[in-house]
Amino acid sequence: MSSRSTLRVAAIAAAGVAVTACGGIRVSNTVPQHKFPPTCAEAVIVYESYSKVPNNYYEVALITAEGNSVWTGDDEMVLRMKQRAASVGANGMVVDAFGTSATTVQLIGAALGTGDADRKGRAVAIHMPTHVARARATCQRSGS
């Protein structure tokens, strides 16, 4: 293989990795069960389990997120899920554990841009009526 061909292959591989890295996180949600005004991501409190939620709440929507496990960390997933929860009027979110469906071969494939390794997360967006004022103040302070 000539040095020009080697350079071309390397450039294509680098472009594939860059596209995969920028591809980001896919986030979706179920149709909201209740209608509440949108909040901001900063106002969404993350709880590890339902038993940790201190107040009565409404379950608003199920939020799911999926990203490439090589390029996506848990913090990024949580942020994107909080943004989606806020868009449906949540001021809290109960998060399931994040998981990876990747073997070593899938991780190598993901690093090369095939998108085979996925990090997945799931949460329930909740609205706590007693937290409306807190959420509103938080959003005003953050400018959201």
Image (cartoon, rainbow, N blue to C red):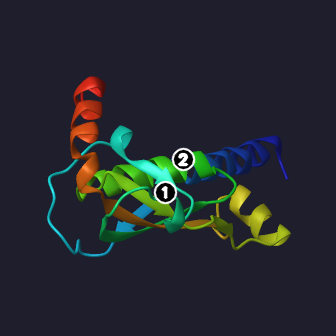
Task: Give the mark nearer the N terminus: 2 vs 1.
Answer: 1
Residue drawn at 21 percent across, 39 percent down? 133
Residue drawn at 73 percent across, 46 percent down? 10
**Image quadrant occupied by the C terminus:** top left
Residue 65's x, y, as percent? 48, 64
Q: Please name whichever residue, 56 or 68, is drawn nearer the observer in this view of the structure.
A: 56
Residue drawn at 54 percent across, 47 percent down? 76
Q: Are marks 2 and 1 in contact (CB under 8 Å)?
A: yes
Secondary structure at badge 1 equals loop
Q: Please name whichever residue, 21 or 83, is drawn nearer the observer in this view of the structure.
A: 83
| Mark 2 closeness class: few <14, some 14–19, many ≥20 residues within 10 Å | some
Q: Amino acid at mark 1?
A: Ile
Left or right position of 100 against 123: right
- Residue 23 seen anywhere in this rendered image of the structure: no
Residue underneath mark 1 = 25
Residue 137's x, y, as percent? 24, 31
Residue drawn at 61 percent across, 60 percent down? 68
Residue 55's x, y, as percent? 37, 58
Q: Amino acid at mark 2?
A: Glu
Residue 94's x, y, as percent? 47, 62
Q: Please name whichever residue, 114 or 52, is drawn nearer the observer in this view of the structure.
A: 52
- Residue 97 seen anywhere in this rendered image of the structure: yes
Residue underneath mark 2 = 76
Secondary structure at badge 2 equals helix
Per the model, the C-alpha gap separating discs 2 and 1 is 8 Å
